[in-house]
Amino acid sequence: MIFLFLTSGLFLGWTLGANDASNVFGSAVGSRMVSFTRAAVTAAVFVIIGAVVQGGGAADTLSRLGSVNAMGGAFTVALAAGLTVYFMTRAGLPVSTTQAIVGAIIGWNFFTDNAVDTRVLTQIVSTWITGPVLGAIFAYALYHLVKTARRRIRMHLLKYENWLRMGLMTVGAFGAYSLGANNIANVMGVFVPSIPLEDADFGIFVLSGAQQLFFLGGIAIAAGILTYSKKVMQTVGTNLMELSSEAAFVVVLAQALVLFIFSSSSLSGLMVRIGLPPIPLVPVSSTQVVVGSILGIGLYKGVRNINLKVLGSIASGWITTPVAAGILAFLMLFIVKNLFSIDVGHSVNPPVSAGEGVSMATIIRYSIPALLLITAIYLVYLVLSEKKKTERLNKKYYE
Amino acid sequence: MSLFTRTNRELSVRIDEFFDTIEIGILIFKEGIKAYVNGDTNAFRNHLSKIDDLEGKADKLQRSIENDMIVHSILPQQRSEIVKLLWQLDEIIDTAKKSLNEFYVEMPRIPASLSHEFISLSEVSGNSAEELMPAARAFFREPHLVREKLIKVYFFERETDKAAFQMKKKVFHEMNDLSLAEKAHIRYITHHIENISDTAQDAADLLASMAIRQML
């Protein structure tokens, strides 16, 4: 029964592996610097290791946003996020699994009358912005370092390429590890509170219940990488901008660093020990960090024509994806609860009424339908204007 | 990974050997023209046979480098440009060999008053190609130095054009003792010597753009 409920999470993991592995090895495979088999096997192994070893931090943050306390609820939330990603991808809209799962959890909170922790939500949303920005900063600095080193060491191009190949494999492995560590929360995070598994003692190491779930999720991501990422790596890997091997190395390293920073509890603890604020452990979208990193390299090269449409589409995804996932989760939870009589969770933390004042939760509660309405109107406008444009072009062409 | 490293090391040695072959070929060409103009037939034949061997060796090296780059997927992003560059460098030694062969087959009569001009024309044209080699080598180690090394290629190419123009002008305007056929023959031979620096210039243009892309 548990496995049946987990299928939606595993499906989400599979899609994540199929799509997001291209952020790690796409440029290397697309440019034939690394063979697909070598890249896929490395990515699959390190994603699982990252998920099991370091997946707890980001998953814990998601649990604080909404602790889905019934398996039916967790299944529905993951399915809603997966379907949102699927439909938005099919519609050609910018989408991220991270943002979809956050939206779906908020949808669950509303449905089960649980309060949304606005502090956690703010923390999560702020990392969506800081992730790509950090990616751009890291990429700029790293690219400068690589270029300076290349100039100083006077290495033969062929030898340099050899080092780059090995570097791409190494940072690719690190990138896959960080992807597993950071994004496993999207795949299995919602199941952790509702599926309490006993610790598994393997003699030399012990896997906690959450780690066992992360291991399963890691396998699902690995399956996505091994079965479906080839096409994505070969085609999508270079669609943003044709990257040189050096740039690809820098982009993957920058992305891996950002994902690592937002998932390492020891790094966050270190910050606290030295008297700095802790780093929020939050799942971030690897695709958006990659776009930020490419932008950083573009800025280093002095690119003047930045396509604001790409940046705009990412920013619009920050709103449309969670809103769409939230609505879908709400509707699906309603159907699952009332039609199939499956327990989808209950209120443990009802929104507190702020007496005469208006609480933040109430503001969010009312602003989300408003945002939904605005998004719906915007989408209708987009569809109509696109239709109008097509008609105008057709008319012009046939005249 | 170890096999891979060995392939790369061998390939870099072969690329250097290819550059050496072209460089020696250019020197032989210059010596060959000098020997022909000075009437030293034995030395000329000796140079002709040497350049023939070097041209064959360069062809073989070029093919093997190209083959290894494709088979072992080496430098996938720059491969097509590097192959094109090697092809253009090979074209230089091909042109030099063809030029010496034409001297051998057609035996053009070079008037004594033109000896000096002929030798200096082959010198500057050869220099243009010769100066290309340090730039081509730099592309693989210090791409940021390529552009400054190419300045001399462009300089010698312009000098070649000037020298060829002066010589053709002299032949057609001042040397009335030569028949029109002899004048046309000299013009034809001059044009072939000029071709070496023109090919070097084409390769230099390609090299410059490759270096810029490496620098970005």
Image (tube, coloured by chain):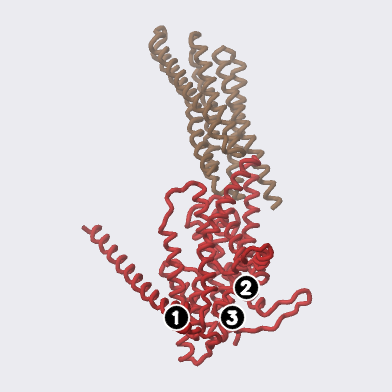
Chain colours: A red, B brown
Tell me the chain of label 3.
A
User: Which amino acid lies under the numbered mark 3 shown in the image of this protein?
Assistant: Phe
Does the residue at mark 1 contact the one at mark 3 (Cβ under 8 Å)? no
Q: Is residue A195 left or right of residue A90?
A: right
Q: Please tell me whether mark 2 sits on a helix, a strand or a loop.
A: helix
Name the residue tied to disc 2: A219
Disc 3 and disc 2 on one polypeptide chain: yes
Name the residue tied to disc 1: A357
Between discs 1 and 3, the one toward the N terminus: 3
User: What separation in Å lies between label 3 and label 2 (alpha carbons)?
Assistant: 16 Å
Q: Is residue B43 left or right of residue B152?
A: right
User: Which amino acid lies under the numbered mark 1 shown in the image of this protein?
Assistant: Gly
Residue extending farthest to the bottom is A341
Disc 1 and disc 2 on one polypeptide chain: yes
Q: Position of residue A396 (x, y in %)?
A: 24, 58
Q: Position of residue B201 (x, y in %)?
A: 49, 30
Name the residue tied to disc 3: A191
One can see residue A341 in this view: yes
Q: Please tell me whether mark 1 sits on a helix, a strand or a loop.
A: loop
Residue extending farthest to the left is A399
Q: Mark 3 or 2, which is nearer the eye?
A: 3
Q: Mark 1 or 3, which is nearer the eye?
A: 1
Question: Up-down: is B116 above or below A245?
Answer: above
Q: How many residues crowd mark 1 within 10 Å: few (<14), some (14–19), many (20+)?
A: few
User: What separation in Å lies between label 1 and label 2 (alpha carbons)?
Assistant: 48 Å
Between discs 1 and 2, the one toward the N terminus: 2
Q: Is residue B24 left or right of residue A98?
A: right
Closer to the camera in the image, B99 or B89: B89
Q: Position of residue A25 (x, y in %)?
A: 58, 59
* Quadrant of the rendering where the N terminus of chain A is positioned: bottom right
Tell me the chain of label 2.
A
Between discs 3 and 2, the one toward the N terminus: 3
